[in-house]
Amino acid sequence: MHRTLACCLLVLAMAGTAGAHFVFIVPDKGGSTVKIVFSDSLEPDEAVPMPKIDGKKLMVELKTTCVDLQDLKKAEHCYEATIPGKGPRVVHGTVEYGVVTRGKDKKETFLLVYHPRAVIGKPKAAMKPYAEATIEIIPTLDEGKLRLMGASKGKAVADAEVTVILPGDKKDTRKVKTDRKGLTETFDTPGRYGAYVRHSETKSGEHDGKKYDEVRHYATLVVHLPK
């Protein structure tokens, strides 16, 4: 697989925000299209208008080649894109949400960045961490079981808290910790899983004229565990 993670730039304007929402790339059952949602589940949130997207690019890994996708289609409360190719594919990228101020007396000011990924089908070879990835979630599919790995800069991250969206009820989640090898517990219920994990950097800077003193990264993942 190609090893450039930050190959999708979807810049979200600060409009219609809501707490505990994340950017997910959600494939359809056939893997020919995806929806890009900003939600607390894997379904579009009808209460949250989609922010504007600038750049309109997604990246798909096809064997050893990366393909840029253009012209996202705006649907109600989500965006849609057609995914080229057949068989196992990975859609991924980076979304710079913007500078957010929160906390008591509004003293927490940070740049919020999402790193969404969707895995279509079962990769023929085990997925490995990207050396360039600030934070990511890697799925391991083996004999009807799923484990997730948290990784940063090409190395596994131990004791990371991963929130897993379980198949079925879209609000059914479980918080799990990674072990010393960066792996979560095993999941064996067939269906579509979502997950997210946070990684923070003490790093100051300026984005769109707004200053921040921290960067908060959230890696998200959508993967299907077949029967």
Image: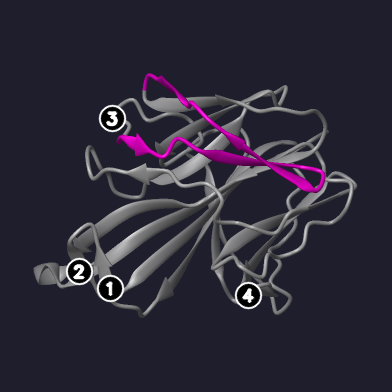
Residue type (three-letter) at the residue carrying disc 4? Val
Determine whether the residue tagged by mark 4 lies in a helix, strand or loop.
loop
Residue behind mark 1: 205
Tell me which numbered mark, 4 or 3, is placed earlier along the sequence. Answer: 3
Give the spatial CA distance, label 4 vs label 1. Answer: 26 Å
Tell me which numbered mark, 1 or 3, is placed earlier along the sequence. Answer: 3
Classify residue 13 as left or right of residue 137: left
In the rendered image, residue 75 lying in the magenta stretch gets the answer: yes
Give the spatial CA distance, label 1 vs label 2. Answer: 6 Å
Residue behind mark 3: 49
Residue behind mark 2: 211
Q: CB atoms at circles 4 and 2 under 8 Å apart?
A: no
Q: CB atoms at circles 1 and 2 under 8 Å apart?
A: yes
- As drawn, 201 above or below 81: below
Q: Which residues are magenta?
A: 51-76
Q: Position of residue 14 (x, y in %)?
A: 23, 45
Determine whether the residue tagged by mark 2 lies in a helix, strand or loop.
strand
Classify residue 5 as left or right of residue 55: right
Tell me which numbered mark, 1 or 2, is placed earlier along the sequence. Answer: 1
In the rendered image, residue 121 lying in the magenta stretch gets the answer: no
- The image's mark for residue 74 is none
Residue type (three-letter) at the residue carrying disc 2? Lys
Q: Classify residue 55 by image quadrant.
A: top left
Residue behind mark 4: 157
Q: CB atoms at circles 4 and 1 under 8 Å apart?
A: no
Residue 31, can we see it? Answer: yes
Q: Nearer the viewer, residue 213 or 64?
A: 64
Residue depth check, mark 4 versus mark 2: number of the one nearer the observer: 2
Q: Residue at x 75, y 36 (%)?
A: 190
